[in-house]
Amino acid sequence: MISPFVNFKLKPGISRSLTGAALLLSTATLINAGESKAALFECFLNNLSACGGQLGDKNFTGFNLVGYTPSATDTLKITESDGVWTVETLFNPSLTNKSGTLSYNIAVVGTNFTFNETEVNVGGSTQTTRPTVLSTMTGILPPFITTTGTAQTRTFTTKPASIAVSQQFTAANRTLNSFTTTYTQNVPGPLPLLGAAAAFGFSRRLRSRIKTSAAA
C-alpha cells in the first residue's frame, strides 16, 4: 500500500513561508542568547579618564574619584547580564583608614527604557565598626548608607532615564575590599513576544494555504 504522504509536496508559497518563519525565529533565538551573555568594561581607578562607554543601551560617562589616591591595581568593572548592569569597584590591596568619593553618570541611549531599582553591596571587615558606602543618586531620597555584610536596595520612584551617582566610601579603622552597585529595569523583553506573534501568524497562514491547496 502506498502511503498517502509519498507524493505530497508543499507549494512554493508555503515553502517560502516555512523558510521565512524559520529564519525569523532563529534570528530571535540568537539575539536572545546574545542578550543573556555578560559583557565587560574594565579600567583602573588611577586612569578613570579612559573608563566608560556604552554597554547595551546604557551609556556610562564622567567617572571621577576624589579624596583617595588609588593603587596601580585598584580596578573598576562594568558588566551587563540578563538586563542587570553592575559597577564593581575593587581595592587591591584592601583599604584601611582611607576614604574617597566615586562619581559617574548613567543614561539610557536609543530606547524608551528607564531605571527601576538599584542595590549596593559592600565587602570588607566584619568588625562592629564596618566600612560604609553612602550613595547619592537621582531618584533616591534620602541617600542611603550600606555596610559590609548587608545589601540595600532602593526602587526609583521617578523611573529616571539617567542617573547621576556619587558614592562616598569610608574605611576608618576597618577594611574595605570592594563595593558593588547594580541597576535594573523592569521592562518585558520584546523579542520573545515578537517570536510568539510571528509563530502564531505563520501558523494561521499555513493552515489557510493548506486548506486552499486541498480544495484545488
Image (cartoon, grey):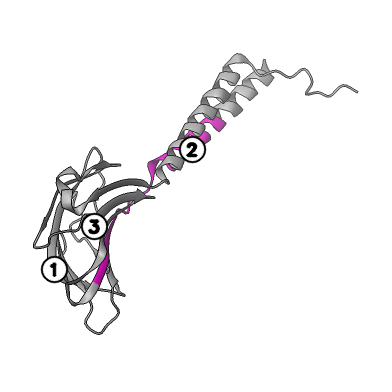
Whether residue 119 appears in this view of the structure is no
| Viewer-closest of 21 and 124 | 124
61 or 20: nearer the viewer: 61
> What whole-number distance in Å separates the C-alpha atoms at marks 3 and 2?
38 Å
Q: Which of marks 2 and 1 precedes in the sequence?
A: 2
Q: Is residue 44 above or below residue 16?
A: below
For residue 190, above or below residue 124: above
Of tags 1 and 2, which is closer to the observer? 1
| Left or right of 192, for residue 208 | right
Whichever of callouts 3 and 2 sits on the residue coming sooner in the sequence is: 2
Which amino acid, by three-letter code, is at mark 2?
Thr
Place of residue 197 in the rendered image (x, y in percent of width and height, measured from the top left): 47, 37
Q: Measured from the top left, where is residue 1 in percent x and y? A: 91, 23
Choose between 178 and 103: the one closer to the eye. Answer: 178
Q: Secondary structure at mark 3?
A: loop
Residue marked by disc 1: 99
Are dots 1 and 2 in contact, CB under 8 Å? no
Specify whether residue 91 is painted magenta: no
- Which dot, 3 or 1, sits closer to the camera? 3
Q: Secondary structure at mark 1?
A: strand
Please identify, in this view, whether the residue under mark 3 or under mark 2 is nearer the observer.
Answer: 3
- Residue 32: x and y in percent read 44, 41
Identify the residue at the far left of this view.
67
Amino acid carrying label 1: it is Ser
User: Mark 3 sits on what residue?
Assistant: 74
Distance from the alpha carbon under mark 1 to that under mark 2: 46 Å
Residue located beneath label 2 in the image: 29
Q: In which image quadrant can residue 98 be found?
A: bottom left
Magenta region: 176-203
Answer left or right for 90 relative to 24. left
Q: Is residue 47 above or below residue 170?
A: above
Density class for disc 3 (Cα within 10 Å; few <14, some 14-19, many ≥20) is: some
